[in-house]
Amino acid sequence: MLVQPKFWQEKKSLRSTILMPLSYIYQWMGRCRFQFKQPYKADIPVICVGNVTLGGAGKTPVVRLIASLIRYSFSLDAHIVTRGYAGSLKVPTRVMPESDVKLVGDEAILLSKTAPCWIGSNRRDTLIHARKEGSSVVVMDDGFQNPSVYKDISIVVIDGPFGLGNGCVFPAGPLRESLDQALKRADAVIMIGEDKQHLFDHTTATPVFRARIQLWAQDVAPRVKRAVYAFTGIGRPEKFYNSLREAGVPIVKHRSFPDHYVFSESDIQNIFSEAEQLDLDIVTTEKDYVRLLPHHQSRVYQIRSD
């Protein structure tokens, strides 16, 4: 579980300067992987949805949207391939909505609600498995920096309000690689939310599409008139809280956990107790909801988004 240090958001930081030599080594290793690795070319189209930063950029709703459009607008059997981050299974495995979150990870369960979803630590093997099971198009969640599979289309997702942090590559900053390097391989960029760092004020060779994540009205409407206790364990929790506020939901109290956090019994009971004392409804994201035990889910509202 990644907890991003504050200096990743600071433009001039002593810590970033000290770590810069390691960033150069990290970038060099990444370039070497692409230079010497021969990618596997599938006999079906592969669409990769990735990002250039560590942490949540909004890939999951983009993957779900693309897979849904391919399946229902073009009548093609699109499957989703992902690593199954935070899950324990390593071999290629079909994920179902009722799968054990500890085995397959929370994001894979969400993706499985849209299209057949496969997880595995080896993307090439998982892709081959999906193909054997009837996939005519693969939408790959993440893997933009992975050279083992040839991508017919690569889409980079950027969280507009977060941008690129301090603009430095890991470990001096949040970048997996420089934006310039990424744009050389990307076919399109999807900017989610306002481009606060003005990364694309000027025309680029890579097309940039603007988008925003919107909460489902049917999830929000019943609770607009009542204040809430919001909790989440996602990469950038402020995105969830801001979305609730924009939807008119008053947040009296909130609590943030690390990304993909496994909630303990005491964590949940503390939230229940505080919410009861303050007479609040309890809300969380759809991704957090699948990590809750069934008897906890009955007391928590999940807020879905597209």
Image (tube, rainbow, N blue to C red):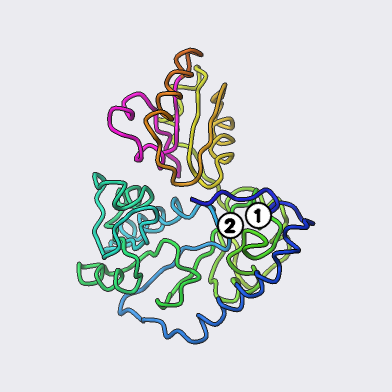
Q: Residue at x 54, y 64 (%)?
A: 156
Judge whether residue 239 is colored magenta. Answer: no
CB contact under 8 Å: marks 2 and 1: yes
Q: Position of residue 91 (x, y in %)?
A: 26, 65
Q: Position of residue 243 (x, y in %)?
A: 55, 36
Judge whether residue 298 is colored magenta. Answer: yes
Task: Tell me the quadrant of the picture where the C terminus can be found.
Answer: top left
Local packing at callout 1 (Cα closer than 10 Å; few below 14, some 14-19, many 20+) is many
The residue under label 2 is which amino acid type?
Answer: Ile
Identify residue for label 2. Answer: 158
Q: Residue at x 43, y 34 (%)?
A: 303
Identify residue for label 1. Answer: 163
Q: Position of residue 166 (x, y in %)?
A: 71, 57
Q: Nearer the viewer, residue 291 or 287?
A: 291
The residue under label 1 is which amino acid type?
Answer: Gly
Q: Is residue 134 left or right of residue 109?
A: left
Q: Is residue 114 left or right of residue 209?
A: left
The disc at residue 94 is: none
Q: Is residue 96 left or right of residue 27?
A: left
Q: Residue at x 26, y 65 (%)?
A: 92
In the picture as drawn, the residue positioned furthest to the left comes out as 133
Q: Position of residue 283 (x, y in %)?
A: 45, 28
Q: Which residues are magenta?
A: 281-306
Give the SS element for disc 1: loop
Give the SS element for disc 2: strand
